[in-house]
Image (cartoon, coloured by chain):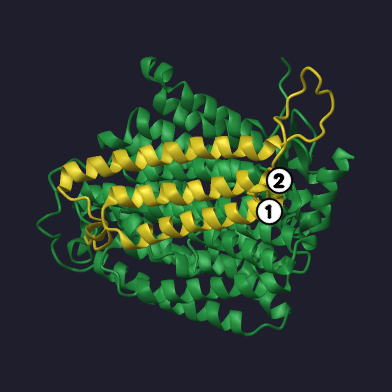
Chain colours: A yellow, B green
Amino acid sequence: MLEFLDSPSVLHGLHTIGSLTLFAVGLYGLLGKRHLLKVFISLALMELAVYLLFIALATTPGETAPILSDGLTAFVGMADPVPQALTLTAIVIGMAVLALGVSLAIRYHRLSASADIRTLADAKD
Amino acid sequence: MEFSASPVWFIALPLLAAFSAPLWTRWHLLDHLLFGVPLVLLILALGLFPTVHEAPLLETIVIAPPLGIHLHLDSASLLLVTLFCFAVTLVAAFLWLGATDSHLRGRRPFVLILLLLVGGNGLVLTGDLFNLYVFLEIAGVSAYVLSALRDDRPALEAGLKYLIIGSVAALFFLLAVVLVYLQTGQLNLAAVAREFAAIPPAMQGLIALLMLIGLGIKSELFPFNFWVPDVYRGSDPAVTALFSGLLVKAFLFVLVHLAVLIWADPAVARVWLMTLGALTLIVAELAALRQDDMRRMLAYSSLGQIGLIMLALGFFSETTTAGAFFHMINHTLVKLLLFLVAALLLRRCLSLRLEDLAGAARVSPLAAGLFVVGALGVLGLPPFGGFMSKLWMLQGFAEAQRIWPIALILFAALIEAGYYFRWIRVLYAPVAPAASADTKTTPEPWAAYAPLLLIAGLMLLLGVAPFLLETSVVEAAHALLDRDLTLQSVLGVAQ
């Protein structure tokens, strides 16, 4: 009954809607939330939405891992490995930036007893 | 192993030096290497000019393009790499000879400044979209930490603000890269350029918009540059000298390079880039009039000059582009000089606010004198290099019979004169230096002024003898604008 979900166009459409929703949630948090950690979580959500979009749209159901092994001797019906490699790299970068951001936020909280992005925005001399 | 002068050294050498920092700390070589590494690269870059003059250098890594990744060293990127290495050498010399603050010495700034150089060099050299994203993040992360280096409240505020806005920019750029890959199946810039026209127009527009937002934030263009003065205000002036002199130039180059490569027809990109450049120029110069802190004033002035460079680059004519490259060099020199002078004044007067700097010329006459030199350089008065480069850009617009950019550039120069002379008047005000000025500390050693005097000398040299750079600047403009040549030199190797 649910076979229609396996057709690439439906699956890709669902993934696109899902990742765009995730992106919108992240964008809302980025613009609407005041706490620094919430802002960083929103950024991470937006990044995840981009990764999801990339991986989901670059693969179609039924593809196998791009590794030549027993019985698999030609690159037929295999997933494109490039998006996965790129996404891995991007996840690592995103993780590092997030860790840096959180550690800066902790230092800032210790010095100013505040984690509010608006005190940051109003910073004057 | 045989040494070959390949562009990979511009990325590999500073990266290697940065990652072996614990070793250099133990051997007390940090200062020497922070100065030495960019100096070696500067000499290498100067030595590569004759080779690149004949044909662009391509360094393929493992597999030939368009499948593998490669570095593309043509006249334009070589000119910028030389400029970046020069800027880092000067700032390193300034830190070595003059910096007394503990946070500007030692391992952390060593690693971060070298990584910033890696990022800048990588951005202009790479021929691959995803590598571009990686270098954008390398340059970004090192810049975020550099702004927060002082580890007090204003510095952390600057760092956090920069990190959040920079991550948003990187995210938009990544989304554009993802869409490009999904549409074309290519990441190599030349291959993408060849196939971009086949993408549906709506998707083309979306990709272009995402890239414009991402790179516009990074290269500090008008609607996206609200964060810049705060970050420049919170960071150390020696660090902002690198932001203004190195980082922004790299992103400007990337933006224009992508625009030229991806659009076979430059008419659309021209409208967008010139509008943004003109808006940045005029808004930033007007805002600079009202600033009471020297770092903010210099930040807005830097934004104005960036708008000017964008205006000239975005016109896509060979004369204005050559002028814009020349102006990039001059602007880097001038802003290095002004921000380093600000660093010296900050140490001397403990504040960079307008009222606290009254009469500062009595306390540190040489710094004030160099500020005047820098101000005249920004204004583009003869005999400094800025005069020649502005003249060159104006000439380019005049040849094309465009009047409004000429009027705009001259009007902006008038506003600049307004606020720079305001600051000069305050520096030379006939009052006793403010109480906060610490007159008891020993004056700066002469060595601290050596890099600044060198910059001032170079500005004068470029103003008197602009023909020294003429061929390389014209070649750079040619290399940047000639899309077919780039495509052929990259894909010709592959086939």
Q: Residue at x 69, y 41 (%)?
A: A61
Q: Chain of mark 1?
A: B
Disc 1 secondary structure class: helix
- Nearer the N terminus, badge 1 or badge 2? 1
Q: Chain of mark 2?
A: B
Indicate the amino acid at tag 1: Val
Q: Quadrant of residue A77?
A: top right
* B408 relative position to B185: left or right: left
Is the residue A76 above or below the residue A21 in the image? above
- Give the camera-side residue of B219 and B452: B219
Q: Residue at x 44, y 37 (%)?
A: A95
**Mark 1 vs mark 2, CA separation in Å:** 8 Å
Residue B317 is situated, as x and y percent measured from the top left of the image, at 73, 69
Asked whether the viewer can see residue B49, the reply is yes
Q: Which residue is disc 2 drawn over?
A: B187
* B266 relative position to B206: left or right: right
Is the residue B446 above or below the residue B266 in the image? above
Residue B495 is situated, as x and y percent measured from the top left of the image, at 90, 40
Q: Which residue is disc 1 drawn over?
A: B180
Crowd tier of the residue under label 1, counting other residues whose Cα lies within 10 Å: few below 14, some 14–19, many 20 or above: many
* A86 relative position to B347: left or right: right
